Image (cartoon, rainbow, N blue to C red):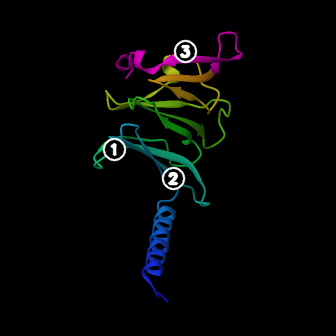
Amino acid sequence: LVRSRGDMRFFLAALLSLTLLASAFGQFGRVIYVSPDEKLRATVIPTKKADGEFHESRVAVESASGKRIVAKDHSSRDQEHGRGVLRAEWSPDSQFFVYTTSSSGGHSAWHFETFVFVRALHRFYELDDFVGSSIVDPDFMLSPPGLFHGRRVGSSGKYEDFDIDLSKIHWAEKT
């Protein structure tokens, strides 16, 4: 029973919280990443397996107004040969959206294909194609303005740390 304005505010806040919570569960685990400049958002959309678990993902990039710019679907028909997003982040300068993936079927469990949405080109690229070998750690760091720090297979076959400035990559050369 609502007896005062304070009680009414509490009731409305509780109702709003429950509504938002129900909405979040209704999105089936979607995660939205807003760019630091707040002009773009990337949404990771898990795809559901028959057993109800989420193992594969789609990634969509939109303007702040909701206009779809580009999407990349990592799901597979059999739900065993796609990729699921593990970690994602915008670069501090808002020019790149970076995310690592793992195989939904357990194939090449040591390899975490890493993708980059390049804002200037409105395209996704696989970062492995630009670093000379496979990325082997799903955890990465981004520092200003767009420096990527990760781990890859080195020329000796051993794992090594590496840094690459995403703004210095000639993205358009790979299609």
Disc 1 from disc 3: Cα separation = 30 Å
Q: Residue 47 carries which label?
A: 2
Residue picked out by circle 1: 62
* Residue that mark 3 sits on: 132
- 104 or 31, nearer to the observer: 31
Q: Is residue 122 magenta?
A: no
Tag 3: amino acid: Gly
The local secondary structure at tag 3 comes to loop
3D distance between C-alphas at marks 2 and 3: 30 Å
State the residue in front, 34 or 123.
Answer: 34
Image coords of residue 106 (percent x, y): 66, 40
Write down the region rendered in magenta: 152-175
Q: Looking at the picture, how far across and down is residue 28, in whole percent?
A: 51, 59
Question: Which residue type does callout 2 highlight?
Answer: Thr
The answer to which image quadrant residue 140 occupies is top right
Q: Quadrant of the C terminus?
A: top left
Question: Which amino acid is tagged 1?
Answer: Glu
Disc marking residue 77: none
In magenta segment, residue 157:
yes
Residue ranking furthest to the top:
156
Q: Residue furthest right?
A: 158
Q: How crowded is mark 3: few (under 14 residues within 10 Å), some or many (20 or more)?
A: few
Q: Which residue is painted at 49% across and 41% down in the image?
A: 74
